[in-house]
Image: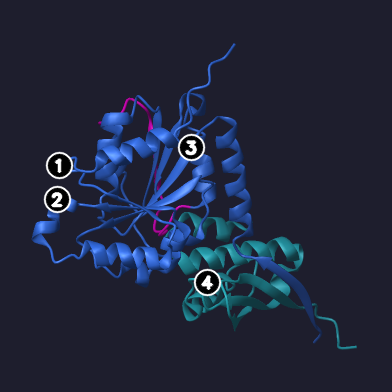
Amino acid sequence: MGASLRAARAGGRVHEMSLAMEIARIAEEKLGDAAPQLVTVAVDVGDCAGVEPSSLEFCLEAVFATPPFAGARPHILRCSGDVLRVAYLEIDDGRPDD
Amino acid sequence: MAVRTIEVRERVMARNDELAEQVRSRLAAHGVTAINLVSSPGAGKTTLLEKTLGTLGEELDIAVITGDVQTQNDADRLAVHTRRLVSAVVTGGACHLDALQVMTAIDAIELDQTRLLFIENVGNLVCPANWDLGEKEMIILFAVTEGEDKPLKYPKMFENARRVVMTKTDLLPHVPFDMDRAVANALSVNPKLEVFRVSALTGEGLSGWFDFLRDSARPVTTSG
């Protein structure tokens, strides 16, 4: 976990922010050194998940603007049920298109 | 540029749930029954625990973890009623406890000398419903000073609980609270709910609560 995430976790959190931090932890775990290349983080949010999508999006924007990330954009995918999961990550590896 | 997609499909709560299972296993290994007390702020969690500790604290070897956004006032209040350590978790803004906090807090508790562990959650009827703490069960307190429709407004919490404790019943003559309607609302959300009606102030109804706790706490295992 990056130092900035640790600092943010130690400070004030609200529900959506704590979820955003957990989503960032999952993304960092998946990407490792490629974290700065993350451009999109897609999250499935069910209508019964107890989560306010716009608030979660706001928190994700804030969290993914801090290192090791470099401004990845959240993409909230609304669905039914109580699902709350990281759907996929998009990274730009800097290589030209095939 | 070349954008590559990485499929993840990982539940956001997966890590918390994994830690909660570790807490559950650890408590089970020591024969500790854990109860997660939740409610709106001000429903009487700390007062009910004060009375519970005063009567059963030693009999059932009760330990307590309190969660508050700020201050350890609740832990200080409870410490008066027990010789045991009351472990305070100050969440620093978070509206609920999580399994990692409970895992850390139980490090300070002598589990071998504990039969019943109360986790007094942060007063909030929304977020704690999502965070498994490794408890055996979640119990909701519902005060007669609240609206009868609380179970309908916050159904997830009532769905996840097994029992609801109606508190402050001494105030019933003074408030326009329809107990039957409130209980009916709770049961409409979760028909399996067991309902207690108590006044921690007068002691009315506490004997039923205490009997339930005696049944819940495992007997002390004797060695040899």
Residue of label 4: A49
Task: Give the mark nearest the N terminus, 2 or 3.
Answer: 3
Q: Quadrant of the C terminus of chain A?
A: bottom right
The amino acid type, in three-letter code, at marker 2 is Asp
Distance from the alpha carbon under mark 4 to that under mark 3: 28 Å
Residue at mark 1: chain: B
Question: 10 Å neighbourhood of mark 3: few (<14), some, or many (≥20)?
Answer: many
Is A95 on the left-hand or right-hand side of B101? right
From what the image shows, is residue B110 above or below residue A98? above
Residue of label 3: B33
Q: Badges 4 and 3: C-beta atoms under 8 Å apart?
A: no
Magenta-span inclusion, residue B90: yes
Task: Give the mark nearest the N terminus, 3 or 1.
Answer: 3
Task: Describe the element under mark 4 as helix, strand or loop.
Answer: loop
Residue at mark 4: chain: A
- As drawn, the label of residue B170 is 2
Residue of label 1: B202
Relative image position of residue B193 (x, y in whole percent)? 41, 56
